[in-house]
Every structure is written in structure tokens, then in C-alpha cells.
């Protein structure tokens, strides 16, 4: 029985130590309850939903929902609201995904690439990747000719780019 108490004590100590070692971000997530998460899911689907409709779907009255939304905005869970524009209707229907390998992956080189990529308006998304290449870019242009120019004149000229590989999207099946 004494052994069981020691084992239980070690378990509790281990649990409390892990609890104390959590990052600030992990600890911050504890403040989100089921209703907060529901509100975030609803707003992610429809950022223009009225407070009355949001309150109804979340199962609360309007005033507490407004207070929760304001708190979620202030705490950075909601970073903003955007309009989803139909890029094809605007003549920007050509999408290419570009794998980028850098010649140097030290911190200063990554920083230089990260800063420079911000200035290329055709790059919609840029993700640092763990794997056989360093970055994955989502590039949107009018057509393949425009893409070729962006690749040759802008992407290839970014700092430390050693190699690129392009995959052209044939159809968008899901986009959020």
C-alpha cells in the first residue's frame, strides 16, 4: 500500500509539473469554453452573421454573445473579418503552387526571404515547410503566361532561392 501511495504521489507530481510547464498559449486556451468555440466556428463560416442570429445559434442571448465576441477580438482569437472575393470573376483564376528550396537556411537567410516575399502581390500564401523543400507558395495570376513572368522575374529573384518546382491547380475543390 505504501508503494501505491508513492506511485500515486509521483503521478500527481508529474501531472502538476507538466501543468506548470505549459506554454502561455496552451494555458490561454483554457479560457475558451464550448460556447466560445461554437461562436468561433459560426463566425469562421459566416463573418457577416447578425448578433441576433449568432446568439440564437450559440444558445445565448444577444448581450452575452456581443461581450464574448468583443473579448475574443481583444484577446486575438478573432483577427479580423474579410470578404471572400471570387478571383476567377476578376480574371485571376490561374493558381499555381510553388515549392521553393533555398541555398541557405540560416536564420538571416530565412528572414531575408520572409521579408522579400511580402512584396510579391501575386503570392497569396507562403508557408515554411518541414520536408524536402523549404517553402510552399500559393501564387494567383491571370494565366500561365503571367505566371511564367512572376516565376522568372519575381520568385526566382527572391533572396537565396536555389530551386523551384511548380504545380498548377486544375480545379479548386474546396476553399475556405
Image (spheres, rainbow, N blue to C red):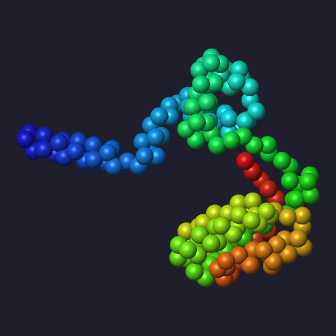
Q: Residue at x 68, y 72 (%)?
A: 99
At which x and y percent is residue 131? 56, 71
At which x and y percent is residue 106? 53, 76
Residue 38 can be seen, yes or no: no
Q: Quadrant of the rendered structure where residue 88 is?
A: bottom right
Q: Residue at x 63, y 24 (%)?
A: 66
Left or right placement of residue 81 versus residue 92 in this view? left
Can you say whether 64 is above or below 6 in the image?
Answer: above
At which x and y percent is residue 10? 19, 46
Q: Residue at x 65, y 22 (%)?
A: 55
Can you say whether 155 is above or below 162 in the image?
Answer: above
- The quarter of the picture where the N terminus appears is top left
Left or right placement of residue 50 versus residue 85 in this view? left
Closer to us: 85 or 116:
116
At which x and y percent is residue 5? 13, 40
Left or right placement of residue 10 versus residue 31 in this view? left
Q: Residue at x 50, y 31 (%)?
A: 33
Closer to us: 107 or 2:
107
Q: Quadrant of the rendered structure where residue 105 is?
A: bottom right
Amino acid at each position: 500500500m505504501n508503494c501505491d501511495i508513492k506511485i500515486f504521489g509521483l503521478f500527481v507530481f508529474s501531472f502538476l509539473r507538466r501543468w506548470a510547464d505549459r506554454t502561455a498559449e496552451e494555458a490561454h486556451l483554457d479560457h475558451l469554453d464550448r460556447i466560445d468555440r461554437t461562436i468561433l466556428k459560426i463566425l469562421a463560416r459566416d463573418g457577416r452573421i447578425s448578433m441576433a442570429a449568432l446568439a440564437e445559434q450559440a444558445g445565448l442571448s444577444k448581450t452575452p454573445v456581443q461581450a464574448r465576441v468583443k473579448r475574443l477580438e481583444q484577446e486575438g482569437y478573432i483577427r479580423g473579418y474579410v470578404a471572400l472575393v471570387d478571383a476567377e470573376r476578376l480574371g485571376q483564376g490561374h493558381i499555381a503552387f510553388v515549392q521553393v528550396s533555398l541555398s541557405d537556411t540560416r536564420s538571416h537567410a530565412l528572414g531575408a526571404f520572409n521579408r522579400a516575399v511580402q512584396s510579391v502581390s501575386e503570392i497569396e500564401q507562403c508557408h515554411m515547410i518541414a520536408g524536402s523543400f523549404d517553402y510552399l507558395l500559393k501564387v494567383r495570376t491571370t494565366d500561365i503566361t503571367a505566371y511564367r513572368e512572376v516565376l522568372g522575374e519575381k520568385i526566382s529573384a527572391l533572396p537565396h532561392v536555389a530551386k523551384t518546382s511548380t504545380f498548377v491547380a486544375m480545379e479548386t475543390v474546396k476553399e475556405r
